Image (tube, rainbow, N blue to C red):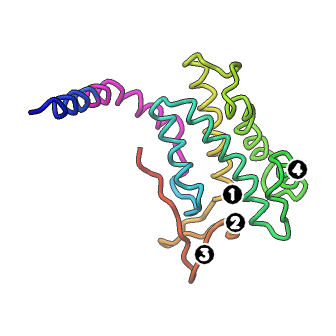
Amino acid sequence: MDNKDRKIEFVINNLKQQDEQTRRDRAVCWMEIKPEELIPNEHFAPVSAECNKLYRDSHYHGCILLAQALAEEYARFLCRKNPPLKVHQKSFETNISIISKKKLISNESIKALKKAYEDRHPYHHLDPSIKKNCVELQKLAKEKVLSIHMVEREIFARIVNRGGITPIHPQYWDIKNGKIEGFLQCEP
């Protein structure tokens, strides 16, 4: 075994040890957030799944940033999917105002979008004021990811009947020949 192979084995062993030491904590984190299992297979679907995994694995800064990006995109998405609204390129605040006036989602989900987006600029620009304490970061990341889940549960709500799925808001799903294209995120 050459030096490069020894280094690779060393890294593999460290990764195994870290996995064993953190497995229970990661399982607990996953159970705390219980992500929406099925969302439309849109460009944001893998980002939503990654946001959940970042929280599970205690990568709180990344989780916060992705939750904020998802909040911003969901506001644009709601405007884009409800014609004749063409304002989706405007600011988050403008899109939220439109969503609120048109009553596209509940007031609770509007509050959740705002909560997830809150303090976006300090985190996006790595302002020195952002939280550094791990406990505070975990709490903030959990609040933001749960806010995103609340919005996802409302806008991507569906009824399961006779082995089929019927979206409550079909305009948010890509439906072709009576079938929806979804993104499953059930893996912890």
Q: Going 68% across and 34% down the picture, which residue do you hit? A: 124
Residue that numbered label 1 is attached to: 155
Residue kind at label 2, given as amino acid type:
His
Give the foreground label among 4 and 1.
Answer: 4
Going by the picture, which residue comes out furthest to the left?
1
Mark 1 → mark 2, Cα distance in angstroms: 7 Å
Dot 4 or dot 1: first in sequence order is: 4
* Quarter occupied by the N terminus: top left
* Residue drawn 58% across the image and 16% down it: 133
Q: Going 63% across and 68% down the picture, which residue do you hit?
A: 173
| Amino acid at the residue labelled 3 | Ile
Q: What stretch is highlighted in magenta?
A: 15-36
Q: Which residue lies furthest to the bottom in this view?
A: 177
In percent of width and height, residue 178 lies at 57, 80
- Secondary element at tag 4: helix
Labelled disc at residue 175: 3
Disc 3 versus disc 1: distance between alpha carbons? 15 Å
Left or right: 8 as drawn, with respect to 79: left
Crowdedness near tag 1: few (<14), some (14–19) or many (≥20) residues, C-alpha within 10 Å: many
Residue hosting label 2 = 169
Element assignment for label 1: helix
In the rendered structure, are the residues bearing label 3 and label 2 in contact, judged by CB atoms less than 8 Å apart? no
Residue 29 image point, x, y percent: 47, 32
Give the label, 3 or 2, closer to the camera: 3
Q: Distance between the residues labelled 3 and 2?
A: 11 Å
Mark nearer the N terminus (3 vs 1): 1
Secondary structure under the numbered disc 2 in the rendered image: loop
Q: Where is residue 130 in the image (x, y as percent from the top left)?
A: 67, 22
Q: Do the residues labelled 4 and 1 touch (CB within 8 Å)?
A: no
